[in-house]
């Protein structure tokens, strides 16, 4: 009885507490926006001091060790290095203390470089790229020239601006002079390479075009010169370092360049989800006593599924084949000079100017 009375006395107190709580406004917490992690500052990483560094083994091993040490992917253009006598199997040994990361890499490259052919490195799109000093300097010159002439090209010859062109058996040298005047950019024609395939300054060109861009008109002239020729003997125009160059594929198929492309969206593996499969041959039929349904059973699904989710490696292989097929395997190693490799979510392509032009025309790269 006493216990019952005490509970009865506590009941009004509990009610008043609930009423008081109901009068208090509810406090809501705002969710903090989720931000993607910032890309690493490679320049800052390469300028950071390292306490103790030991790199041993082959040159390839040492570069891999350096990449893991600083946490930055390193791409080595082995085709160029081997052309100047530096092999990936070259033995190296480097032990240094309290030096910057960039100094470590430079010391390593000095040890393996051949006399008169120094090596160097540069940063491009999240990668440290190792190549020759000559290639690095040429890259800087192209970048400077491109900055000087890119605005001029766009300003004087917008891609969509219509023009009229009319050539009737006009000598090629005069046709190209007209384009040089219209575009207003540095213009270089490799007449020696054109002569090697039977094209000279007096080769006649006929073109009648109205309301087309300069670039489309130039494409049509080039296609006329290339008719019936293979990709190596065909003629191309390429803007490189602010200079519009015209030459044959053989001329553009000498030195390789490296480009890096983000392909994270293409490398995402899509799993194969199990689900019902409709048997179209049985749809609408109702055979008494057979117990067939419109859908396969789970056992049927398991027997017909030959694989699970497509692996990342399989996607990389498929992407590589698509790119190579777009311009022909003969322009890729081992027959040609091009190569493809993957670093994380990026595809690194080493190819000649001819290779890049063909990929651009095929829509394999932008």
Image: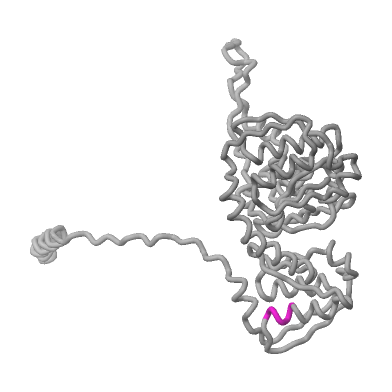
| Residue at screen point 76% across, 70% down | 64
Q: Looking at the image, can residue 8 be seen?
A: no
Q: Position of residue 111 (x, y in %)?
A: 84, 80
Above or below, 122 against 107 in this view is: above
Q: Quadrant of the N terminus?
A: bottom left
Q: Is residue 98 left or right of residue 227?
A: left
Q: Is residue 53 left or right of residue 204?
A: left
> Residue at the bottom extreme?
97
Query: Which portion, as a residue range, is magenta?
Result: 101-105
Q: Position of residue 285 (x, y in %)?
A: 59, 11
Q: Position of residue 239 (x, y in %)?
A: 70, 51
Q: Quadrant of residue 132?
A: bottom right
Above or below, 15 against 171 in this view is: below
Q: Looking at the image, can residue 195 be seen?
A: yes
Q: Is residue 231 left or right of residue 49?
A: right
Residue nearest the observer in this picture, 258 or 266: 258
Tell me, yes or no, whether the highlighted magenta stretch contains residue 43. Answer: no
Residue nearest the observer in this picture, 157 or 113: 157
| Residue at screen point 82% across, 57% down | 255
Residue nearest the observer in this picture, 285 or 87: 87
Above or below, 229 against 149 in this view is: above
Q: Quadrant of residue 136?
A: bottom right
Above or below, 131 against 150 in this view is: below
Majority secondary structure of magenta residues: helix
């Amino acid at each position: 009885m006493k216990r019952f009375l005490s509970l009865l006395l506590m009941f009004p107190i509990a009610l008043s507490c609930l009423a008081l709580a109901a009068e208090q406004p509810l406090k809501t917490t705002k969710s903090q926006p989720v931000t993607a992690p910032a890309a690493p500052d490679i320049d800052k990483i390469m300028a950071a001091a390292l306490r103790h560094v030991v790199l041993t083994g082959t040159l390839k091993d040492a570069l891999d060790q350096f990449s893991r040490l600083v946490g930055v992917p390193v791409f080595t253009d082995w085709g160029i290095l081997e052309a100047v006598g530096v092999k990936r199997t070259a033995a190296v040994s480097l032990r240094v203390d309290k030096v910057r990361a960039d100094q470590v890499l430079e010391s390593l490259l000095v040890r393996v470089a051949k006399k008169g052919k120094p090596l160097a490195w540069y940063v491009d799109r999240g990668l440290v790229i190792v190549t020759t000093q000559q290639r690095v300097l040429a890259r800087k010159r192209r970048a400077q020239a491109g900055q000087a002439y890119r605005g001029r090209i766009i300003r004087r010859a917008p891609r969509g601006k219509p023009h009229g062109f009319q050539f009737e058996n006009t000598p090629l040298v005069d046709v190209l002079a007209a384009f040089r005047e219209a575009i207003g950019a540095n213009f270089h024609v490799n007449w020696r390479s054109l002569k090697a395939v039977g094209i000279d300054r007096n080769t006649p060109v006929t073109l009648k075009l109205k309301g087309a861009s300069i670039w489309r008109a130039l494409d049509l002239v080039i296609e006329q010169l290339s008719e019936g020729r293979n990709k190596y003997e065909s003629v191309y125009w390429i803007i490189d370092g602010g200079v519009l160059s015209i030459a044959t594929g053989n001329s553009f198929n000498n030195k390789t360049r490296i480009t890096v492309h983000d392909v994270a969206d293409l490398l995402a593996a899509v799993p194969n989800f199990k689900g019902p499969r409709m048997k179209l041959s049985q749809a609408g039929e109702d055979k008494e006593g057979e117990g067939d349904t419109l859908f396969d059973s789970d056992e049927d699904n398991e027997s017909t599924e030959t694989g699970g989710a497509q692996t990342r490696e399989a996607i990389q292989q498929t992407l590589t084949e698509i790119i190579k097929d777009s311009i022909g395997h003969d322009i890729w190693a081992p027959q040609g000079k091009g190569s493809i490799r993957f670093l994380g979510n990026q595809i690194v392509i080493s190819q000649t100017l001819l290779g890049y032009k063909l990929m651009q025309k095929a829509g394999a790269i932008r």
